[in-house]
Amino acid sequence: MLLDIGEVAQRSGLAASALRFYERKGLISATGRNGIRRTYEPETLSRLALIACARSAGFTLTEIGRLLHAKPSDDALRERMAEKASELDDRIAQLTRMRDSLRHAASCTHDPLIACPEFKQVVRGTG
């Protein structure tokens, strides 16, 4: 069953204008029209989820377009994906330290909290 642009917008959390923009960029494609409204295959929702994930990982729309049309022989793209994976590892480590620091601070009795040696150690990544 095809989804009209309003349904895709509602389910994906994106504005219809964003969907039309992604279509112009070649990231998604409408299958036709229902009256004046564009229609999409349900798989478009999965593609939009992938686009959102890639954007949050720091990929540009151009890079996402390349990713969506990649072939196994695209060595340059594979290299870029490996670089992004390393960058994400760094971000995950940073966010994990922040999470651990906040968990500690939530029950710490040091005054002020940021003076706590354990808090400082976790934030620096040495704890």
Image (cartoon, rainbow, N blue to C red):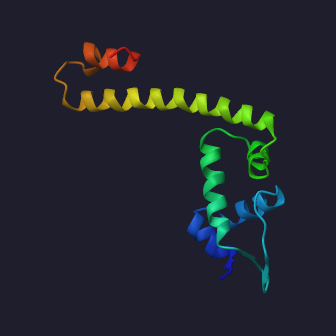
Q: Position of residue 68 (x, y in %)?
A: 75, 52
* Residue positioned 39% across, 26% down in the render: 97
The image quadrant that residue 25 belongs to is bottom right
The vertical placement of 46 against 107, above or below, is below
Would residue 78 appear left or right of 108 to someone viewing this image?
A: right
Residue at the far bottom: name it.
35
- Depth check, front residue: 88 or 107: 88
46 or 34, which lies in front? 46
Tally of numbered discs: 0
Q: Residue 63, located in which quarter of the rendered image? A: top right
Foreground residue, 17 or 26?
A: 26
Please state, as top left, top right, bottom left or bottom right, where the C terminus lies in the image. top left
Side of 32 where 96 appears, left or right: left
Q: Which residue corresponds to the image point at 83% horizontal and 59% vertical from the top-left? A: 24
Q: Position of residue 118 (x, y in %)?
A: 26, 17
**Residue at horizontal 67 percent and vertical 29 percent from the top:** 83
Quadrant where the N terminus lies? bottom right
Residue 53: give x, y in percent of width and height.
60, 48
Q: Position of residue 48 (x, y in %)?
A: 65, 59
Residue at horizontal 24%, vertical 19%?
Answer: 112
In the image, taking residue 106 as reference, residue 63 lies left or right, namely: right
The image shows residue 116, relative to residue 56, as above or below, that is above
